[in-house]
Amino acid sequence: MSLVTLRTQLLRRKPLEEIEEDTPADERLAKSLGLWQLTAIGVGGIIGAGVFSLAGSVAHSVTGPAVLISFLIAGIASAAAALCYAEFAGMIPKAGSAYTYGYVALGEVVGWFIGWDLLLEYVAVAAVVAIGVSGYFRFLLEQIGISLPDWMMGALGTGDGHVFDVFAALFCLGTAWVLSRGIKSVGRFETVAVAIKVALVVLIIVLGVFHIDSANYTPYFPFGTAAVMTGAATVFFAVFGYDAMSTAAEESKEAKKHLPKAILYSLGIAMALYVLATLVLTGMQKYTEISPDSGFSTAFESVGMPGVANIIAVGAIVGIITVVLTFMLGVTRVWFAMSRDGLLPEWFAKTHPVRKVPTRVTWIVGVGSALMAGFLPINTVAELTNIGILSAFIVVCIAVAVLRHTRPEVPRSFRLPFMPVVPIIGVVFSGWLILSLPWETWLRFGIWLILGLLVYFFYSRTHSKLESNEPVSPAS
């Protein structure tokens, strides 16, 4: 094979004109999601551990009351990527999100690597959050006097006698079951659960505002102003999630119209709640007294409201479960899209004849995430997440600028403003955060990408649906 042929294969792009083509019945997804169901899925993926635990942890150890500014900085950076996602979502209403966008704008090898990357990252996010939910659930069992064997209380190395985190694994399998019931059931569940979660955060804000002591805001920068940027890098984990929601594009009734709005609405709602909640949290307690693990619960206990603290613990479980659902939805749709394009075996792209969801992939992901959540400590799994999501953000920001230049005539239901300033902000901030990650994270990420390279060259390159359409111009 000549270098010219190889280059053509690596850089061939999925033609935009093929995006709207109909798909076989057994590879077709049901269109059931409306604007507010999509928004609920987005909010469900964003609001979770960030508000219930991460805000308190960062305020206590990294920023002090200035955690509010850290959330704002992370939100602005995430908004730059969100605007890029919104333009793509209104132009390419297909499953796969960043994978599909990269494939169309930058070529097959870029699309492959970002899709391969997201397969690991989304599963890791689901596992991390499931482990977090398991911790809250075990706490509630202890509160009502239920004791269970040590071996089932956590992964090996996380405590005396721990072997396997049974509850984390069950949460993953339960989420896979919900996803397998059909996208309409998912939309209903997310809408109800997110409504409960948002109501809880609003309750926290409304009740907490009456217990704010302005003296707790002084000093505002106890760790220095530079710590605010460190805090922003830490809480960035809490301000994405809309990217996973965008993988459900094909299951939206009016994707071109609704997806851009849902992306922006979900981030806007989440950021407003984050800002108000952190303002209340750091006002209710001195930053040195905020619990890194259960900030809001201990804050309300400190002002004589233990009943509210228990409600928060229960609501946190409901709220965090929606994050597992959103990211597991995301990974199954990326896998489905890659298989339908021929880059992974097409067997995975078959949908249930009645429910029209990729049940094969769903259960494989459910079992895989359950094993990861059950056997691995949370820190080990968490280190796998940010680098992949940030890489996807960089690809999407570059791709939207490239496609605006190469295909300006393509109709766009949403056009991001201030091109190319917004994509540049997204690339620079995401790149800076990636460079701040430890070398162990880079090593694991590199190993996964090398494995992906082998899969691509020995399978995907020759099985791609575009292979049968050669020659394909890299610039098509």
Image: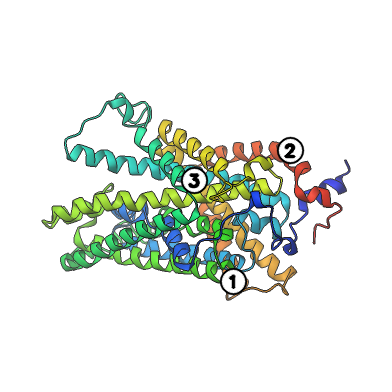
Above or below, 12 against 454 in this view is below
The residue identified by callout 3 is 180
Question: Which three-letter amino acid code belongs to the residue tagged 2?
Answer: Tyr
Comparing marks 1 and 3, which lies closer to the viewer? 3
Residue 61: percent from left, percent from top: 31, 50
Closer mark to the observer between disc 2 and disc 1: 2
**Residue drawn 50% across the image and 36% down it:** 368
Q: Is residue 169 left or right of residue 105?
A: left
Give the residue at mark 1.
421
| Sequence-wise first label, 1 or 3 | 3
Using a 10 Å C-alpha cutoff, classify the residue at mark 1 as few (fewer than 14 neighbours), some (14 to 19) or many (20 or more): few
Judge left or right: residue 250 versus residue 372: right
Q: In this orientation, which residue lies closer to the viewer: 253 or 120?
A: 253
What residue sits right under mark 2 in the picture?
A: 459
Residue 345, compared with residue 28, is above or below; it is above
Residue 31 visible, this angle: yes
Amino acid carrying label 1: it is Val
The residue under the point 54% across, 66% down is 259
Residue 372 coordinates in the image, percent (x, y): 46, 35
